[in-house]
Image (cartoon, rainbow, N blue to C red):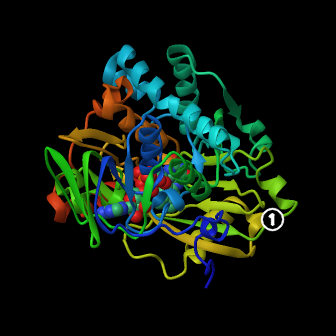
Amino acid sequence: MEGGPGNYYLATAHPFERQPPLSGEVRCDVVVVGGGFTGTAAALAAAEAGASVVLLEAETIGFGASGRNGGQLIPGLRWSASHLKREFGLERARAVHDVALQAVERVKARVAKHGIACDLKPGHLEAAWKPAHFAEIRREADTLVRDFGRTGLEVVERADMARHVGTDAYHGGLFDAEGGHFHPLNYVLGLAAAAQRVGVVLHEGSRARRITQNGAVRVETAGGTVVAEQAILATDAWTGDLKPRLGRFTVPLMNYNVATAPLGDLAQTILPSDAAVADSRFVLNYFRLSADKRLIFGGGERYRTTPPRDIGGFVRPYMEGLFPDLSGVAIDHGWGGVVSVTANRLPHLGRDGAILFAHGFSGHGALLTTLAGELCAEQLHRSSRGFDLLAGLPHRPFPGGRLLARPLATLGLLYYAMKDRL
Ligand SMILES: Cc1cc2nc3c(=O)[nH]c(=O)nc-3n(C[C@H](O)[C@H](O)[C@H](O)COP(=O)(O)OP(=O)(O)OC[C@H]3O[C@@H](n4cnc5c(N)ncnc54)[C@H](O)[C@@H]3O)c2cc1C
């Protein structure tokens, strides 16, 4: 079996002292539930604005998707610029797009301000799987530049793709200098450490069992209770456990990554410009180099919640299909995580009384979550235009209620995956 030792990021995480579970009753201005990108960014920003903040994490900081993802920093939302324009008209589309794009600067600013050592590197490439996808990419680049004032984009012709990626599988691509990649677990641990330095009290091993509001918000764990004026729910795929009504807006999908052994000189052949790459397939392949020159590769489709017995063996054919040079290369790590997906693939932010929430980043959360967390923190004490714009995105719960939502969503995904193959 391959990829045995699990999550590469855990094996290369910076030390972070284990935080004690919540015990007894504590009072504060703001309680944040969930210690991923969203929760730590929200807690940090709320404390910087002067609030007393307690953060409750069920397991350990970064235990969820934030400590397991592909580390690809992809600017913008899942909707293309033309889709946004069609749905909202140019003015609103631009406003939404501009807010989403702020995520890039906000992440960079956090890394710089707090000196977070997370191997942040610039450059992201969207690679066209079919000629029609490349035509679409060209149109999208035109719209982004002409109507949305985007800079840093370069349409890469098929003949030039070798500058970025060592496979001839792709028909061209879009290079985005604003995108990039990072070590996600070290980023979230860096945010948590920065939050502690401005007074946030962190409790790990503190699963919120119940959240209620009656003027104040009460969050109960097995060992204690937090009573706060306001709360931020940053529990992404687990939001439905605490708020079943909100849980209906997302379905959880499993996704798997591997890290090869360090590639040495081969790394330069596979990814010469060291950009992160995601392709345009519906069930996409996405990959990048780690700081120690391993290929971190995510790919493949699996619609069951149970992990494959052999994650390395499951992902390997997708990786070797693109890079035959990697045939037989050792896979040192294999791990999975839950991606929380909304019906329209846009994040779902909002307010329920004194509880703000942000979830359903749909595989695009590595950048958007810092933004979402910070906008939630802003919204606590003043009306935030950015929060309002994202909270105004149209959302519907998945059809089928708790029992049928997942199978129905799976059927939809199978349909699109099949279209990719035909
Ligand atoms: C395998 C994989 C690959 C991905 N690749 C990419 C990528 O390359 N680029 C990209 O942009 N996005 C990617 N994503 C998506 C991205 O990781 C997520 O959108 C993002 O991490 C969500 O962050 P979050 O803080 O909202 O949620 P999470 O990181 O999931 O954090 C939620 C936290 O809440 C805690 N929690 C849950 N319930 C409770 C409770 N009741 N009480 C207390 N705590 C609780 C959990 O333990 C968890 O730590 C990927 C996701 C996965 C799984």
Give the image location of residue 406, x and y in percent. 26, 62
Q: Is residue 247 above or below residue 112?
A: below
User: Is 320 on the left or on the right of 47, as rendered?
Assistant: right
> Ligand 1 shows up in which quadrant of the image?
bottom left
Amino acid type of the residue that numbered disc 1 sits on in the rendered structure: Leu
Q: Residue at x 57, y 18 (%)?
A: 145
Left or right: 370 as drawn, with respect to 245: right
Above or below, comparing residue 299 to residue 132 in the picture? below
Label 1 belongs to which residue?
263
Residue depicted at 55% across the width and 34% down the height: 106
Nearer to me, 413 or 298: 298
Q: Is residue 375 left or right of residue 116?
A: left
Please tell me which residue is depicted at 35% across the width and 18% down the height of the picture: 92
Q: Nearer the viewer, residue 417 or 421?
A: 417
122 over 34 or under it: above or below: above
Q: Position of residue 392 (x, y in %)?
A: 28, 30
- Kindly give the residue lying farthest to the bottom in the view shown: 1
Secondary structure under the numbered disc 1 in the rendered image? loop
Is residue 418 in view? no
Q: What residue is at 18 percent from the left and 62 percent from the top?
A: 402
Residue 109 seen in this snapshot: yes
